Structure formats: C-alpha cells, structure tokens
Amino acid sequence: MKAMVLEKPGTPLVLKTLADPRPGPGEIRIRVEACAVCRTDLHVVDGELDHPKLPLIPGHEIVGMVDAVGDNVDRSIIGSRVGVPWLGFTCGHCPYCRAGRENLCDMPLFTGFTRDGGFASHVVADQRFSFRLEFADDPVAVAPLLCAGLIGWRSLKKTGDAKRIGLFGFGAAAHIITQIAIWQGREIYAFTRTGDISAQRFAISLGANWAGGSEATLETVLDAAIIFAPAGELVPTALRAVRKGGRVVCGGIHMSDIPRMSYSVLWGEREIVSVANLTRADACEFFPVAQKAQVTTHTVVYPLERANEALDDLRRGRLNGAAVIVP
C-alpha cells in the first residue's frame, strides 16, 4: 500500500510503499476513499502532542470500504462503507469506561496517533470503533464529519441551551457546527484571525449573524462561546464576551498556555470547560442530526502525495472548510 509516514515529529511526511496491513481478531481492513485533515494532525506532526507511535501514518477522519476482516468479525461487513474517528480503542473496564465516559479512558488508542491512520491507501481499525455509513454517497463530503463534526457536536452540547454562541476560530469544526446551530434556531457570532476577511465572509455565507476579528468587541452579550483555535489567549477574551453564568468551551486537544487574568473576568459564575476526544454515543447522536440539518461540508481535495501541502495550508490558515486527502 501507499502511505504518508511521519518518521520524526517536526519533519515532513514521507511517501512510502508498505506491505498491505492484515486485520487481526476483531479488526477490519479498509480501502481508504477519503481522509480529512484535522488540526490535531498538525499537533501530532509538529510535535505538540507527546509520545506518538513512530513511525506513524497520521489521519483520523477516515471513510472507506471494508475489504478484509479478521477473526470474530462478521464477513457480511465486507463491501460496506465505514468511518473511523480519532478514538480507536478503549479498555472497557476502567472507571471512566464503566461510567459511560469512554472518551476519558485511562488506556485508549487514538487513530493517527497511537495507531496508524488514514493518510494511506489502506488502514486497519477495531470494528467496534468504526461506524457504518450507509447514508454516505460522497466519501469526501462525509470525511470531515468524523472529527470536525463529532468534536464540534460534543462542544456544542456543552453550551447547553445557549441562544447566542460565539465561535473563536472558524475552521472545519466551526463551519459544520454553524449549520447545525442555525438549524436549531441559535445565533452564531464568528471570531476569526484578525484581518481574515475570507473566513468572515465564509461564516456570513453559512448564516452567521456576525463575523469579525477576535479582538472585536460585540454589542451583543453571548450566552456561550466555543474556542476551536489552539490559542490560550482567547480564553479571557471569550470570558469577557459571555454573560454572567455563561460558559466557555475549549474544543481542542491542544492549546497554548492560558495567560494570567484577573479573577473579575471569570467572576459572575462564568465557567470554562474542555472537551476531550469523543464517544461512540456522540456519533450515534450526531450523524442523524447532520442529515436532518442538511449539513454541507466545504472541502479542498489533495492527492495522497500532497498531504504535506494540505497540512501546511491548514497550518497557515489558507483553508475555508476542510482539507481532504484522497489516495
């Protein structure tokens, strides 16, 4: 098979020809049709997340067709389209797993981080942590739902019944969740990098009530905010934008340090919460909602050998929507 391989964090991926992987017990092999590029992939490649499997094939927003199965897997799944997300395995017996909070498992494996991912022509996955995608006619369009959509959904749920929501960082997750929030009858206020007129226009085109730079001061007081950008300095900014009793949700797996701030910024029973990983239950909730809301993903397609270019375009903020790798 062909794969883009990370040999050392901080270095470009290398295109390699490898032996086709074989599925073990309980596993399926997938012929990859599309794999979206996530900011977490950047954190892995750039060395901002510790202890990746090396060498590593990144990528965890995978859509493809099952072409082989291991022992203890029903062979009828061969030929089915499935999706593989970030959470690739949980132990099932730690206190978090037993409490239905498998996203906090003490001994997890993560696709494209501690097990090989989808920047390849084939990938092996635990069948229990893959999702049947009978509704998916377009693999490229569906791929961003496997993480940007799922983490965005989990972040949106953390805002409770908030009516006016600020989104800080308008990338793949924000452009999906904007559509769902508006379908739910909420208002979206999009905060982008300073001067990023393209992203601001993109947000308005999707139905946002307002879009501007992250330094802008709103006349509207927000009920909640979600920070998708990996920038800790946005936490006090978002807290200042939400009402008393409001909540700021940090939606990323990695963020730069939160700066020192006055207690008065947090006071008034404002809250800061984080979102960690996802659960399979999130997917069961989210995919039907995305269909009902008629979510349209905006994608830019790259062939496998241009994965480094896709990562760099994401790194430098040159994308509206999501980059998708197609082997």
Image: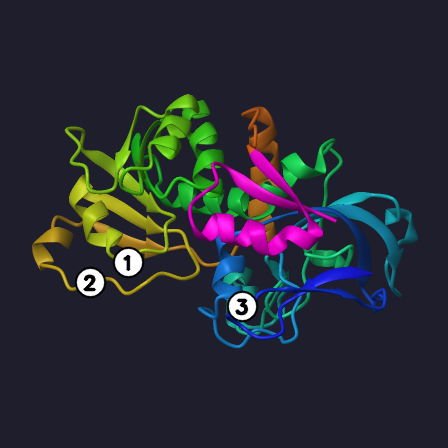
Q: Can residue 246 be seen in this view?
A: yes
Q: Is residue 220 magenta?
A: no
Label 1: which secondary element: loop
Residue 85 appears anywhere in the view: no
Residue with the mark numbered 1: 232
Among the two numbered marks 2 and 3 on one chain, the one whose residue lies closer to the N terminus: 3
Position of residue 309 relative to residue 200, above or below, is below
Of the numbered discs 1 and 2, the one sitting upstream in the chain is: 1
Per the rendered image, the range of residues in magenta is: 299-327
Position of residue 150 measured from the top left corner of the image (x, y, whole percent): 53, 45
Q: Residue 105 carries which label?
A: 3
Q: For the residue marked with disc 2, what is the amino acid?
A: Pro
**Which residue is label 2 attached to?**
259
Report which quarter residue 41 is drawn in: bottom right
Which residue is rendered at x = 28% and y = 65% of the image?
Answer: 257
How crowded pointer 1 is (Cα within 10 Å; few <14, some 14-19, many 20+) is rated as: some
Q: What element carries label 2?
A: loop
